[in-house]
Amino acid sequence: MESHFIAVSDRVKLIKPSPTLAVNAKAKAMKAGGADVLNFSVGEPDSDTPLHVCLAGTQAIDAGFTRYTAVPGILELREAIVARMAADKGWQYDPEQIQVSCGGKHGLYNMAQALFNPGDEVLIPAPYWVSYPPIVQLTGAIPVLVPLLEKDDFDLDPGVLKKYVTSRTRAIILNSPSNPTGSIFSQSTLEVIAKMALERGWVIISDDIYNTIVYEGGSLPHILDIDPRLKEQTIVLNGVSKSFAMTGWRIGYSAGPKHIIAAMNKIQGQSTSNPSSISQKAALAAVSGPQDFSVEMTKAFLPRRDYIVKELLAIPGITCVVPKGAFYVFPNFSAYYGREVKGRRIGGSVDMSDYLLEEALLAVVPGAAFGADPFIRFSFATAMPVIEEGMKRLQQALARLV
Ligand SMILES: Cc1ncc(COP(=O)(O)O)c(C=O)c1O
């Protein structure tokens, strides 16, 4: 008898592989093959994890701290997260209101599985981080994309938001500073969202993963600071990946109402059991130790941001919002769409990214991956000489398009 072709689930057919991870993998493969690729596609700091954090990890191994832990994460770490949030933000949580997960992405996944029912509508401002729509779709809920406009510096226009609200709206995902735009939601925008959420009983998901990387000393408005009642309706997501250059350690955390965290713990307990015991000890050192790493990293990013923005704006036809936080810049390349070089037509952001990778050896992420085709995302978490050379190559590659 012949073997049978085994079909995959309908659920998985709804989603695509992460485009950012795909570009990064292609760039790395080309580099391994000897091509001098400059990588602007990576979503991680270029620094190493701080030494004291690494040592806490190796000490955990030496001490035999290598077994299963409590499902929501070790109590010491959850207490340290509570203390960190109180010290930095003045927010009061109990350790039972905290879940430690295998990265921030996994915290979002647990949250969505614990909260959403098929048919629920989840408002996602677009450009959005690539994983929000698939994480929502995997629950049967519906991502509703709310456009953010370049002319508003990618802040949310409450008038636009209202057009996307229905009786089925269940939640809104906020990411400020944002990946991919680097923009920050203004106090006045958050006030409108807060009012609507209170009136309509929405869940607010506040993805704060870039909240330590903010430029020019500006304060970072937060929805929880607008009305204390919102704490009962808000899940705050964060982690150590970006703030402590710990992307490979896979530690994120969520804070929210006890019953929601308990539901998320059920999901985690039946899927990953717990995040790595070793990584939890390292994260404990990060969260409870000195916080200057992030401050220094942000200081190092600032001249790179200023330089890349200046160079991009010097290219004819390109417009670019100055990022206020995170380490991405999201310029508008649409003036170059429809142009050609040697019979190759650049129809949109995917063609542009392919062209830049193949012909200029520049790895960037097409805006289409973030629901915004006019744009291309560049990460400036890379060394200054790389940025300088990258901008030269970009200018030359674009000048060839007619
Ligand atoms: C907006 C946003 N949220 C969450 C994450 C998740 O980070 P991690 O799972 O690496 O902790 C990322 C990572 O790129 C991100 O950009």
Image (cartoon, rainbow, N blue to C red):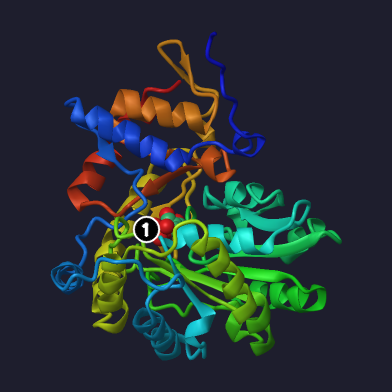
Q: Is residue 188 left or right of residue 77?
A: right
Across and down, in percent, residue 270 comes to: 52, 59
Ligand 1: does it lie within 8 Å of the C-beta at label 1?
no
Q: Is residue 163 shown above or below 252?
A: above
Q: Quadrant location of the C terminus?
A: top left
Across and down, in percent, residue 281 comes to: 27, 73
Callout 1 crowding tier (Cα within 10 Å): few <14, some 14–19, many ≥20: many
Visible residue check, residue 395: no
Q: Secondary structure at mark 1?
A: loop
- Residue at 74 percent of width and 74 percent of height: 197
Q: How many marks?
A: 1
Q: Is residue 32 left or right of residue 256?
A: left
Q: Quadrant of ligand 1?
A: bottom left
Q: Which residue is mark 1?
A: 327
Instruction: Find the residue positioned furthest to the right.
Output: 167
Residue type, numbered disc 1: Phe
Q: Quadrant of residue 186?
A: bottom right
